Image (cartoon, rainbow, N blue to C red):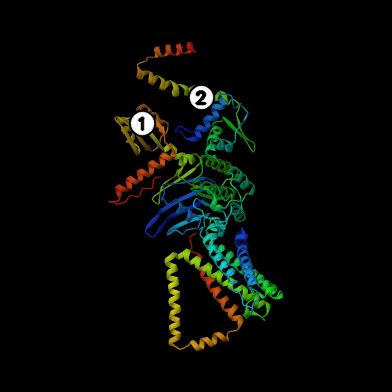
Amino acid sequence: MEDGRPIFLQIAELIENSIIDGTLAEEAQVPSTNELAAFHRINPATAGKGVNQLVDEGTLYKKRGIGMFVATGARAKLRDRRREDFAQQFLHPLLAEANKLGIDADELKRMIDRWEQGR
Amino acid sequence: MNRVLTVTRVQLVGWQNTVGWPWLLLIMIFAVNYAVFLAIGDIEDNPTTGALISIYIVVFVTSINWITQLLPFSMALSVIRRTFYLATALFLVVQSVVFGILLFLCQLLEDATDGWGIRLRFFGLNFIDQQNPLLQIAIYTMPFILLGFLGIFVAVFYKRFGLTGMWLLSTGTLLVLAGLAVLITWLDLWDGIGRWLTDQPMAAWFVGWPVLLAALLAGAGYLTIRRVTP
Amino acid sequence: MSTVVSAQQVSKRFRDVTALDDVSFTLEENRIHGLLGRNGAGKTTLMQIMTGQLLASSGRLTIDGRSPYENETVMSRVCFIKESQTYPQYFKVRHALESARLLFPGWDEDFAQALLADFRLPLNRQVRKLSRGMHSMLGIIIGLASRAPLTLFDEPYLGLDAVARHLFYDHLLTDYAEHPRTVVLSTHLIDEVGELLEHVLLLDQGRVLLDTTAEDLRGQVVTVAGPGSAVDELAAEYEELHREILGRYARATLRGTFGTAERARAKALGLDLEAVSLQDIVVRLTTAHARSGDATTTGTRKKETLR
């Protein structure tokens, strides 16, 4: 675990990423808190906090005595949320940097088109 | 009480090095004695070799090691001082009785074989022939108990009060003894004490007084260990 | 959650040294607590008082509500592994393990055997002939297999290589997850154990400098870097622990609340936010404390237990 943000948030995000990219299908069982803790070498309570946040948000649900599962519809919901965050997280810094270098919006668009064609 | 018995079991861990070692040493010394006396040939007057004292010295050293080595280790495994002390005292008394009986049996064997075939007196003590067996066992046992509690007390005292404490204790003891001697001389009591001492029965000499002294040492050790740091 | 260890104004004075100075804290049940601090901060003394090996000079320390000193009931639930542990001269590795098996009610022999195999510790070697690292492994095996409800490790891995240390962390984590218990871990290697800890108690010169959850601490301390004037502006609102300057560029370690709004503000000022590792936090706090301590020795010494 790196990065300045609390570890439990990073754990939650890791699980979200797996759901978005399809590694964890809907209704699939999620690794247990202890497995997560052992894998990432973190305190089980911290891992539990990350998982619980996802439960509170409705991304995961608990089956008593069995474990934690991905809720139906979780993938679409997460994607919508990430799309909303996209502008803030990626466009904002992009535009700020472009502004610093004197690149205007039109030039930026052209750069993106060229990048797409070049691939 | 359960915990006390458990701790005595811990004292038996690696017993070859604690309980076994004195006997191994005694057997080796016996072998040397036997070889020497065999080489000398006929022995007159049935002298006691005196080498038996070695086992008492080894047990004395072992009792010091209980405090210097086994106590810190036991406390590291969450044994409290009181329990350790009771377990050690129990262990010492039982071991002393067992050793006493074993020495007594060796003496019987020595008598039966007429000194191992060469009239060697290794286990037998001249002054306790013709006594009842229980008293004989007690005479073998008591020095173990007395030396054991002395070793425990000295080691505990050292651990509690350090070198300075030891120095004060030994100097103090010497001063008190010297003072007593001066007092006795001054009051001209030596004859009376001498007579009183020779009048003491054998049982008092070898059992009664040692038991009293051992009990005093055991009590002092118990009080001192309560504030010992491992 | 209930309290296992409670210390109220505990002090310990040796002849001319004050090892612990008015220390108060509580340790909650079934958590992994980190006892951190520099050499001589008082960590070992505190653990010795917690395990009844020493008596406090003043104050009161309890385990499960009772003093641990000469208390069999309390002590039968405690295991204390210290780095400098001595064993009887004649002891072999198996003797040490046999003693531990007899004395710890929760001892798990299968687990001990598995650990022994993992650490490749020779059963029949004399303890005094073990290398430094192997000596540490023996302590670790006893500490883990004892499954004592309160297990304390004091610098448990001197001489252990990285492989063996990570074996220890892995076993500690998995076994703790399956058999929750209260663990107190005192260590220098803060970066390695930082993420294992749930609660941090930082001692400095016998005082509690920090008593908080590891998670809170992580969000509380941040390094900001950028133009000096911008750093100045932001730093004015926080407790500044440390600053480095390179020309007009500055980097400061700040303490306070850093939520989304505060982070956005720093970004708007053109500052970069960097994470601070637990190790760095501890270093910054203890050095900041030492500086302020020096400054106040002539005047009245201010009470500065940071919370």
* SS for dot 1: strand
Residue C225: x percent and y percent? 36, 31
Q: Is residue B166 visible?
A: yes
Task: Tell me the amino acid under the disc marked 1.
Answer: Ala
- Viewed as shown, does residue C45 lie left or right of B47? left
Task: Tell me the amino acid under the disc marked 2.
Answer: Arg
> Which residue in the structure is indicated by mark 1?
C225
Q: Nearer the viewer, mark 1 or mark 2?
A: 1
Residue C117: x percent and y percent? 61, 44
Label 1 – label 2 distance at C-alpha:
31 Å
Residue C30: x percent and y percent? 54, 46
Q: Quadrant of residue B114?
A: bottom right
B134 versus A98 height, above or below: below
B169 versus B192 height, above or below: above
Pinpoint the chain carrying mark 1: C
Pinpoint the chain carrying mark 2: A
Q: Residue at x 46, y 13 (%)?
A: A115
Seen from the viewer's position, the closer of residues C109 and C160 is C160
Q: Is residue C79 visible?
A: no
> Which residue in the structure is indicated by mark 2?
A81
Seen from the viewer's position, the closer of residues A52 and C156 is C156
